[in-house]
Amino acid sequence: MVCRTLPWVVSKYRLDELTTVKELQRVLEKKFRSNWFVRDPRAIDLLIFKGKEELDMVQQQHKQRHHLINDYVVGPQQERQVEELERKENLSKFMKGFYINDV
């Protein structure tokens, strides 16, 4: 259901100049997979409710464009840049902190 609405979201919120539908699908997949360890049925119901509520807010346009950009475009890009910096072994702790704050 979420992937079916992504093309509409990209066109309605004019996100096509910043990202693609495939990239948004990857971001959402990562968000879904980040909760793989949850086994409690009540917690699963809560996560489903929160996800449906988020989708409804986007579809009803209660969220503005900058909310979506921060949550699904810029935020994941910054996470990837931080992961790349952590892979570099020859940087000092100071330089890693500098690059992370500069992003």
Image: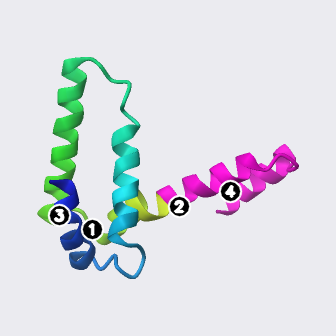
Packing grade of label 3 (10 A; few <14, some 14-19, many >=20) is few
Circle 4 sits on which residue? 101
Q: Is residue 22 above or below residue 49?
A: below
Mark 4 Cα-neighbour bin, 10 Å: few <14, some 14–19, many ≥20: few
Cα–Cα gap, marks 3 and 1: 16 Å
* Percent of width and height locating residue 62: 18, 62
Q: Earlier in the sequence, mark 2 or mark 4?
A: 2
Please indicate whether residue 42 sits to the left or right of residue 19 in the image. Answer: left
Residue 69 placement (x, y as % from top left): 39, 66
Q: Amino acid at mark 3?
A: Thr
Q: Which mark is residue 64?
A: 1
Question: Which residue lies most toward the top here?
Answer: 40
Alpha carbon distance from label 4 to label 1: 26 Å
Q: Residue at x 74, y 58 (%)?
A: 99
Q: Is residue 62 visible?
A: no
Sequence-first tag of 4 and 1: 1
Q: Secondary structure at mark 1?
A: loop
Q: Which label was assigned to residue 10? A: none
Residue under the point 87% across and 47% down: 92
Residue 64 vertical placement versus 81 (above, below) = below
User: Which residue does the numbered mark 3 point to in the structure image?
Assistant: 5
At label 1, the amino acid type is: Gln
Question: Neighbour class for label 2 at 10 Å: few (<14), some, many (≥20)?
Answer: some
Question: Do residues under tags 3 and 1 come within 8 Å of each other at their CB atoms?
Answer: no
Real-space CA distance between mark 2 and mark 1, rounded to the nearest whole angstrom = 19 Å
How would you classify the magenta stretch by its main secondary structure?
helix
